[in-house]
Image (tube, rainbow, N blue to C red):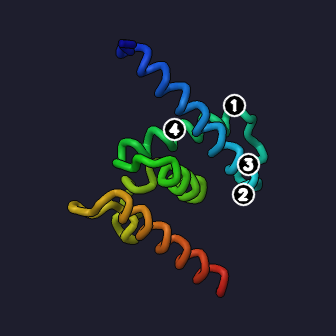
Amino acid sequence: MIQITEWQMQALNDACDVRRATRIARAMRKFFADRFSGHTDEQTHAFALQCLNQARLRGLRTEGEAHRYANLAALLGIGFEDTPAAHDTGLAPRAVEVPGIWLRRVGDRVEQMLREREKR
């Protein structure tokens, strides 16, 4: 029987995070080119890793959820959900809200806010 040590498992998790961050960073460069044009690849990758970590802290577990969080963070900044403005606009997580539901609710709200801004 093969036994995997804790440090081996951590190394595997770290390697997976690097690959996830690479995919997210590539998408950030493509879909948010104006926001990341002045950043190096390393800076964009570091941003993606920070988003992965913040998403994990928020209870977002899938790569898709982390990617959606990164999209919002590209618009609003990493940790946007902890700001006073987030509480004022309803973007902060509610006390008993499931993380994935919070993410969908916030994404819908931000999209609505952007559409309203375009109409002006």
Whole-percent x, y for residue 11 in the image: 48, 19
On screen, residue 38 versus residue 16, left or right, reads right
Whole-percent x, y for residue 119 in the image: 65, 87
Q: Nearer the viewer, residue 79 or 23?
A: 23
Q: Would you call the spot at circle 2 few (<14 residues within 10 Å), some (14-19), or many (20 or more)?
A: few
The three-letter amino acid code for the residue at tag 1 is: Glu
Going from N to C along the chain, the mark reached first, 4 or 2, is 2
The three-letter amino acid code for the residue at tag 2 is: Phe
Helix, strand or loop for disc 2: helix
Q: CA distance from mark 2 to mark 1?
A: 17 Å
Residue labelled with disc 1:
42
Any part of residue 39 in sight: yes
Q: Which mark is residue 110?
A: none
Query: For residue 10, which quarter of the picture?
Result: top left
Going from N to C along the chain, the mark reached first, 2 or 1, is 2
Tell me the quadrant of the picture where the N terminus can be found: top left
On screen, residue 106 versus residue 59, left or right, reads right
Q: Which mark is residue 31?
A: 2
The three-letter amino acid code for the residue at tag 3 is: Arg
Q: Looking at the image, which residue is at 22% across and 60% down?
A: 95
Residue labelled with disc 3:
29
